[in-house]
Amino acid sequence: QQQVKQSPQSLIVQKGGISIINCAYENTAFDYFPWYQQFPGKGPALLIAIRPDVSEKKEGRFTISFNKSAKQFSLHIMDSQPGDSATYFCAASSKGAQKLVFGQGTRLTINP
Amino acid sequence: KAGVTQTPRYLIKTRGQQVTLSCSPISGHRSVSWYQQTPGQGLQFLFEYFSETQRNKGNFPGRFSGRQFSNSRSEMNVSTLELGDSALYLCASSPGQANTGELFFGEGSRLTVL
């Protein structure tokens, strides 16, 4: 019940295209859903996050869509660029717990 | 502001040894968390400290331990190392208030157990 399932494991998108990564969870106590971006040799860095009181959040080219009833959320990267090539992790945490449960990660490659 | 600093960045140990990893959080951050990252298991939560107290703990054996000092710096220790402990160990800090979820990660300490 603590798991967060992420798909796909890897994704190749052409420059300018839309990258979509999906995550699903079971634990209804989760109330914070961040996405982290990790480049090789670096630690993960927060990209964008959402709470379940909204269905969508947009920051620049990055959008999170959240479906509370389906217990799913997704990351959309519009106009994908080669610099977006990285590993993306979805995560979730419960209120009061400074502890993130991560998805398995998606290795995104943007072809120029 | 300086970011999260982890030392050492790389280390090699043999089975049965122990290792201590260090983490200096962002100035003013009172919460420090540790995560293990492996290709097979991904990112897994080890423990979290706030004001020198362990506030949350993951599902790792007792060989994994940690502590936090009064200046918020943290150390984690792994005793009786096993081959499966080879991983990137990531430290993350946050201000520590009611769950905001935003963690600031260091670049990690890559441990290889031979």
Image (cartoon, coloured by chain):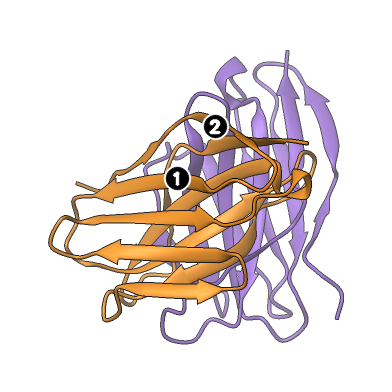
A76 displayed left or right of A40: left
| Colour representing chain A | orange
Percent coordinates x, y for residue A54 in the rendering: 30, 79
Q: In which quarter of the image is residue B95?
A: bottom right
Q: Which amino acid does label 1 sit on?
A: Ile
Percent coordinates x, y for residue A8 in the rendering: 43, 32
Q: What element carries label 2?
A: strand
- Residue matched to label 2: A11
Q: In which quarter of the image is residue A86?
A: top right
Image marks 1 and 2: residues in contact by CB distance under 8 Å? yes
Comparing B43 with B57, the one in front is B43
Vertical order, A9 against B56 (above or below): above
- Residue matched to label 1: A21
Question: Quadrant where the C terminus of chain A lies?
Answer: top right
Q: Mark 2 lies on which chain?
A: A
Percent coordinates x, y for residue B99 in the rendering: 42, 79
Q: What residue type is labelled 2?
A: Leu
Vertical order, A104 against A73 (above or below): above
